[in-house]
Amino acid sequence: MLRGLFAAIVGQALVVFVRLLTAPRAIWSGIEPIPRQRVYFANHTSNADFPTIWAVLPGFLRAQTRPVAASDYWLKSKVRAFFGRDVLNAVLINRDRENRDPSEDPVAMMVAAIDEGSSLIIFPEGLRNLTEEPVLAFKSGLFHLASARPEIDLVPTWIDNLNSVLPKGEVVPVPLICTVTFGTPMHIRPGEEKEIFLDRARLALAALGRERD
């Protein structure tokens, strides 16, 4: 009980810290912030990406929204584990395909979280994008998740300027103003092939980024 209370206090402190550091502005260009279950799929350029999305959500949405993140990163130390598991309530994914247990299937874990009533934040590029390309090719997880729960809104979510706040390899953030834009929800079409769906989703996210340029 005390651990949960402390995690809640730290969570509120994290929201305040992110808002003071980046003054993030939520732009609801394609949806309204209403109590509806969703999967927010976003571009990935910084370790601060999902705390920023999580922080700009209204409290009633934040309470039901879980980031999907790599367990090898967030369980690397006790402090990271506390933030990832207790504060952010992340769905922690084992990326080691060869050595993970069948019970650790990433899609099954995400579907289970949705079935429990959670919304999700995911990064379909997999790794941080350090290239000149606006959006990298998507991994297959988004397709399998959409196929398993086709009724769930898939919301392209563009984070702007955050890679300048906390570049790769840096631990001290630089205060800058950021925006998080939530686009128009999409769904998988009946019989839609994986490559077509993933490309459509990637283009929707890239288009949202171009709107912010």
Image (cartoon, helix red, strand yellow):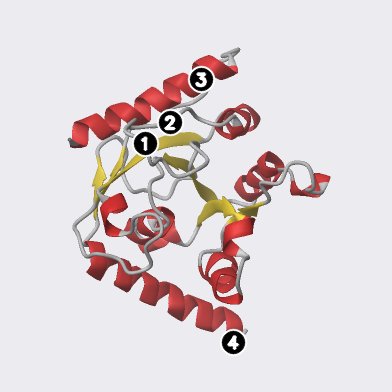
Q: Which mark is residue 197?
A: 3
- Give the amino acid at mark 2: Leu
Image quarter (top left, top right, bottom left or bottom right) of the C terminus: top left
Name the image quarter holding residue 128: top left
Is residue 8 at least partly visible in the picture? Answer: yes
- The residue mark sitting in front, 4 or 1, is 1
The secondary element bearing badge 4 is classed as helix
Image quarter (top left, top right, bottom left or bottom right) of the N terminus: bottom right
In percent of the image, x 63 and y 57: which residue is there? 72
In percent of the image, x 38 and y 72: which residue is there? 14
Report the Cα–Cα distance between label 2 and label 3. Answer: 15 Å
Q: Nearer the viewer, residue 169 or 66?
A: 169
Indicate which disc, 2 or 4, sits on the residue closer to the N terminus.
Answer: 4
Indicate which disc, 1 or 2, sits on the residue closer to the N terminus.
Answer: 1
- Give the amino acid at mark 3: Phe
Q: Residue 178: percent from the left, percent from the top?
A: 23, 53
- The residue mark sitting in front, 2 or 4, is 2
The secondary element bearing badge 3 is classed as helix
In percent of the image, x 25 and y 67: which residue is there? 21
Q: Residue 144: percent from the left, percent from the top?
A: 63, 30
Indicate which disc, 3 or 1, sits on the residue closer to the N terminus.
Answer: 1
Indicate which disc, 3 or 4, sits on the residue closer to the N terminus.
Answer: 4
Sort mark 2 into few (<14), some (14-19) or many (20+) by Cα contacts within 10 Å: some
- Find disc 1 in the rendering and name its residue: 131
